[in-house]
Amino acid sequence: MFVPTPGVVQAPVDMGQALAALEGSKELLTTVVQMVVDQAGVDMAAIRSDVAAKSAVALAASSHRLKGSLGAIAAKPAHQACSALNKLARSSAVASYPLGLAELEMEMDRLLPYLRTWLDQNKNAKELEDGKS
């Protein structure tokens, strides 16, 4: 399980790292972030369903898919929570699925509003920039 350092709140995303991984392309980062936001609801619904069904195989697959998306945008806390849930699924630790899901949901509840705000700010900045050209 992911255990946060007491008293330390990590930002939901390291945008600098995410941007560096995409060779500094803010346009590409914006596209990837939008894709993550658009897909997160589908992925979380699948994960919730897999936890309820106590399906290790399905949960391993659904959490792995989301984990990859979160890693692509350097969403470290959510990625760590998703990775922990994925490990629980791969070890068939069914009794721990609800706790793992709760941790992931908490991080996703922090992450998604952050990403939506970031997208809105970048959209507004681009519109201002385009208006000046």
Image: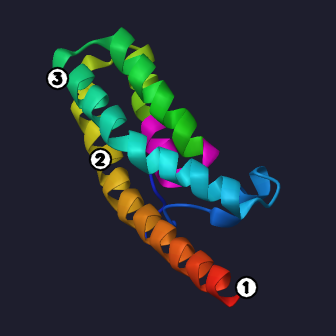
Three-letter amino acid code at the position of disc 1? Ser
> Going 29% across and 47% down the picture, which residue do you hit?
105
- Residue at which label 1 appears: 133
From the top left corner, tell me how far across and down residue 127 is, in percent: 57, 79
Query: Local crowd at mark 1 within 10 Å, few (<14), some, or many (≥20)?
Result: few
Say if 60 sits above or below 21 in the image: above
Q: Are the residues tagged 1 and 3 within 8 Å (C-beta)?
A: no
**Percent of width and height locating residue 57:** 38, 10
In the foreground, 63 or 9: 63
Residue closest to the far right: 23
Magenta residue span? 72-83
Disc 1 secondary structure class? loop
Examine the rendering and report whether any part of residue 1 can be seen. no
The residue located at (62%, 44%) in the rendering is 72
Query: Which of the labelled discs sits on residue 81, or is there none?
Result: none
| Spot occupied by residue 110 in the image (x, y as percentages of width and height) | 36, 61
List the residue tagged with mark 3.
52
Residue topped by disc 2: 105
Question: Magenta stretch containing residue 73, yes or no?
Answer: yes
Q: Nearer the viewer, residue 44 or 129?
A: 129
Label 2 crowd bin: few (<14), some (14–19), many (20+), radius 10 Å: some
Give the amino acid at mark 2.
Glu
